[in-house]
Image (cartoon, rainbow, N blue to C red):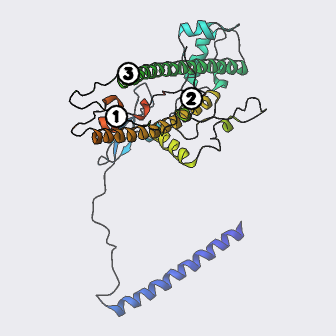
Amino acid sequence: MLMCMSKLFSFLFDLQLYVRTLNMNMGDLSTDVGNNGYKQTKIKLGMRKPRKWKWMAFTNPARTDNATFYHWRRPSDEPKEYPFAKFNKKVDLPTYTDVEYQQHLKCEGWTKEETDHLMDLAQRFDLRFMIMADRYDTLKYPKRSVEDLKERYYKICGILAKIEEEQFLLGELKKIEARKKERERKTQDLQKLISQADNQNETPRKTDKKLPKKKITNPTRPSRIDTNAVESAGIKFPDYKNSGASLRSQRMKLPANVGQKKSKGIEQILQEMGLDLNPIPTEEICQHFNELRSDIVLLMELKTALGSCEYELQSLRHQYEAVNPGKTLSIPSQLLSISDNETKVNTAEIIDVVGSPGTPSNT
């Protein structure tokens, strides 16, 4: 202890000697520099007035009891929300009705009142099961362990999640049925228009009395459209059911006989419809996605056939006008293309006129 004290006194003595020497040197410097030198008697600080602080009230939005607290804050600062309120996170707990409990949530050994008490504790203590077990009302209900509370709670969550998923799927099924009925109705209307156009073509045309009756030998014009090819158009996907174990994603791959042009056309139409090019390969999605792409290929074939038919109609009209000068051949509006009628059809309203091999048919 004495040694430490002696070292401390020695250090203070050396420090005092150093300060005296420094002051003597500074005094000599000030006398040499003069009045306009570096020596200043006082340090000049900023002349601005300090900003005031005020003891002001604030509220915490995370609390529900409207408690008021106070803290120091500058009056010039804008009032902001309490910064620590963002850490108040609440757990979203599932809810159920009396009907849902009676139909799905009944359990042996648990009453509805005890289940409601469990869900109330979960809401109050944010699923802290240790605290829930400590605050459990053992006077009204039997004593439960932490594992019992967890098992009952998560079982309720699983059942309610399944119920919500079933309701969502039922809603989607109703939408699909409504779209299917609308598509069938439009298909029937289109078939009626096609049959009317066929009947008009089959009615015999009246010959003009002013023209001399001459037999004009017209050879039968071969059609460029192969009706059998159009009817059998589409994509024939291989059947993997009898080939052993396989992945569902393999069923969604296009066969090798589909050309690159058709593949690009399929991708373009799917993008216009806002669909994913590689959806989740479930059993139902695989079936409907393959049927959709088959219908798209059929639509492309029908468009090609329609273009050939229009070309033949124009050729026949020019031949008729050449044989009968001064007359024009009017083509029925039902046989004109969409561009001639100046109408637009939405991609989502494409009608499956000729069913693809995998398309189910209602009888």
Residue positioned 56% across, 10% down in the render: 100
Residue type highlighted by circle 1: Leu
Residue positioned 65% across, 44% down in the render: 256
- Residue ID for mark 1: 336
- Residue ID for mark 3: 199
In the image, residue 3 sits, relative to residue 70, either above or below, namely below
Q: Which is nearer the N-term, disc 1 or disc 3?
A: 3
Q: Quadrant of residue 147?
A: top right
Q: Quadrant of residue 248?
A: top right
Residue 137, percent from left and from top: 63, 12
Instruction: For the N terminus, give its image quadrant.
Output: bottom right
Q: CA distance from mark 1 to mark 2?
A: 25 Å
Residue 275, percent from left and from top: 50, 37
Residue positioned 42% across, 86% down in the render: 26
User: Would you say 210 lies left or right of 78 here?
Assistant: left
- Residue ID for mark 2: 356
- Dots 1, 2 in contact, CB < 8 A: no
Q: 136 or 116, which lies in front?
A: 116
| Pointer 1 local density, CA inside 10 Å: few below 14, some 14–19, many at least 20 | some
Residue furthest out toward the bottom: 32
Residue 255, percent from left and from top: 64, 41
* Residue 209 disc label: none
Q: Secondary structure at mark 1?
A: loop
Q: CA distance from mark 3 to mark 2?
A: 27 Å
- Dots 3, 2 in contact, CB < 8 A: no
Q: 108 or 223, which lies in front?
A: 223
